[in-house]
Amino acid sequence: MSVQFMLAAPTAAVDAYSLTAGRLVGTTAALVALAGVVIGRLALARSADRIGTVNRRSRAIVALVAGLTGMVIGALNLAVADGGPGTGNGVVGGFLALLLGLIAVILGRLALARSRRAAAPPHQVTS
């Protein structure tokens, strides 16, 4: 079998349950973004008020970083994909990583703003 024949041959369909490199990257990006959503939600939880603003701030930053990381990896995976969903390129995982990453970034930003408000000294009213 020659190399030209192998390069010219159309790619075979990928089995629905086979784990390809594209699917692995897309799934990993989606899991990182999902972790950002969970951590961002924990940073916004009312129980975090008892813990303190330092823990809320660190959780918010972790949620932001995880969300942005998932979005970047998902976007890169979509950029190199040469087919649609079901082709084994991880397109579904890439889209899911973009969506979950955006949610994680929004939750992290809200928690960061809330931690800054809680850490600010109260306003003193002078009469």
Image (spheres, rainbow, N blue to C red):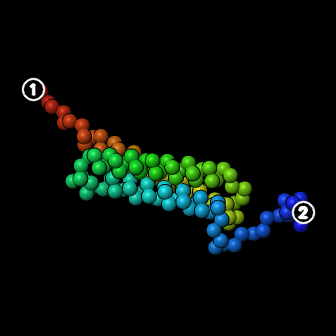
- Image coordinates of residue 107 in percent, x first then y, are 40, 50
Q: Nearer the viewer, residue 100 or 8?
A: 8
Per the model, the C-alpha gap separating discs 2 and 1 is 91 Å
Q: Disc 1 marks which amino acid?
A: Ser
Q: Is residue 99 left or right of residue 15?
A: left
Q: Is residue 105 left or right of residue 18?
A: left
Label 1 sits on a secondary structure element that is loop
- Image coordinates of residue 113 in percent, x first then y, are 34, 42
Q: Residue at x 64, y 60 (%)?
A: 22
| The N terminus - image quarter | bottom right
Classed neighbour count for the residue bearing mark 1: other residues with Cα under 10 Å, few (<14), some (14–19), many (≥20): few
Q: Nearer the viewer, mark 2 or mark 1?
A: 2
Q: Residue at x 12, y 27 (%)?
A: 126
Q: Disc 2 marks which amino acid?
A: Ser
Is 81 located above or below residue 113 in the figure?
below
Q: Nearer the viewer, residue 66 or 97?
A: 66
Label 2 sits on a secondary structure element that is loop
Sequence-wise first label, 2 or 1: 2
Q: Is residue 2 left or right of residue 52?
A: right
Q: Is residue 118 left or right of residue 30?
A: left
From where the camera sits, is residue 39 visible? yes
Residue that lies at the very extreme toward the left in this rendered image: 127
Q: Which mark is residue 2?
A: 2
From where the camera sits, is residue 108 visible? no
Residue that lies at the very extreme toward the top in this rendered image: 127
Q: Residue at x 33, y 53 (%)?
A: 43
Is 107 located above or below residue 7 in the figure?
above
Q: Which mark is residue 27?
A: none
Residue assigned mark 1: 127
User: How many numbered discs, if any?
Assistant: 2
Q: Residue at x 30, y 40 (%)?
A: 116
